[in-house]
Image: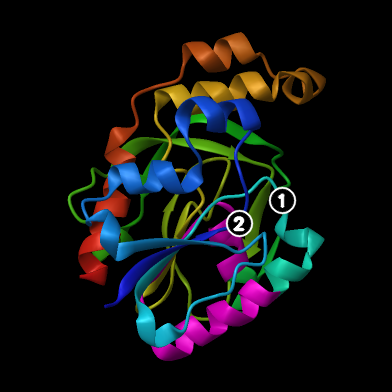
Amino acid sequence: MKYLYILKTGNTFDNTKYNYGDFEDWIIRELKTPSKYIKTIDVKNNQTLPKLVSAKGFIITGSHSMVSEELNWSLKLEEYIRKIKQANIPLLGICYGHQLIAKALGGCSNYNKNGKEIGSVKIRQLSTAKKDLLFKDLPLKFYAHETHYQSAIKLPKGSIVLAKNSHEKHQAVRFSNCIWGVQFHPEFNITVMKEYIVKQKESLDNLGIDINNLLKNVKNCSVSSKVLNNFEKIVK
């Protein structure tokens, strides 16, 4: 039996996890694949990475860590990403996962010169996404949930940018024929997005960002979750 593996690179806030689940739970909630065909590997806690022959596909989660920290578990995952590419197995990176793929394949991820991006933001597809399977049936412009300081600031050679906005020029990227990354969080819902705003109140206050305004403008971004469904179809 082959599995869709979720490579878990961190945990959400403790209270959020208690009330609403963790990163892998939110991803699985959006998928239609039966749970018996999905396995979560806790990479940050050094759970053994699976043999590639057992994989139908991979999703790398977000994280509260920073790619630029170059933590040991993250460096090991970079090496594994390169093996996934060589094996031509479908891979999708979300936020941290997106940035890590960029770094692993020869690009660079670090702090975004535009600062932190958080909340429900508008994203625009580029013409390059028109025939891309990850963006099948998504509108030209859509809203998605975001929370990130760092970005894939330099892309590996051969990468194709699929979507952007005024803050982040690499909102979605195809890194190879079967590897993608999205800076936004297609697994977040309204409740989770609000949790991330409230939990970061102190740091947002220090940045002069009004959390009440952010909370007021949180939107239903369920259309962005279609990238998870589309990736699932690619895996199948």
Specify how the rendered protein is coloured.
rainbow
Q: Which residue is mark 1?
A: 65
From the viewer's perspective, is 218 left or right of 154?
A: left
The amino acid type of the residue labelled 2 equals: Thr
The image's mark for residue 9 is 2
In this rendering, the answer to whether 195 lies above or below 11 is above
Taking the spot 30% from the left edge, 60% from the top edge, the residue there is: 129
Taking the spot 76% from the left edge, 17% from the top edge, the residue there is: 205
Q: Residues within 10 Å of mark 2 (few under 14, many from 20)?
A: many
Q: Position of residue 86 (x, y in %)?
A: 46, 90
Q: Quadrant of the C terminus?
A: bottom left
79 is within the stretch colored magenta:
yes
Seen from the viewer's position, the closer of residues 203 and 217 is 203
From the viewer's perspective, is 1 left or right of 87?
A: left
The image's mark for residue 162 is none
Q: Could you tell me which secondary element the residue under label 2 belongs to?
A: loop
Q: Position of residue 154 (x, y in %)?
A: 64, 66
Dots 1 and 2: beta carbons under 8 Å?
Answer: yes
Residue furthest bottom in the image: 86
Q: Earlier in the sequence, mark 1 or mark 2?
A: 2
- Provide the major secondary structure of the magenta segment: helix
Q: Position of residue 161 (x, y in %)?
A: 44, 63
88 is within the stretch colored magenta:
yes
The amino acid type of the residue labelled 1 equals: Ser
Magenta stretch in the rendered image: 76-101
Q: Could you tell me which secondary element the residue under label 1 belongs to?
A: loop
Label 1 vs label 2: CA separation?
A: 8 Å
Q: Position of residue 67 (x, y in %)?
A: 71, 59
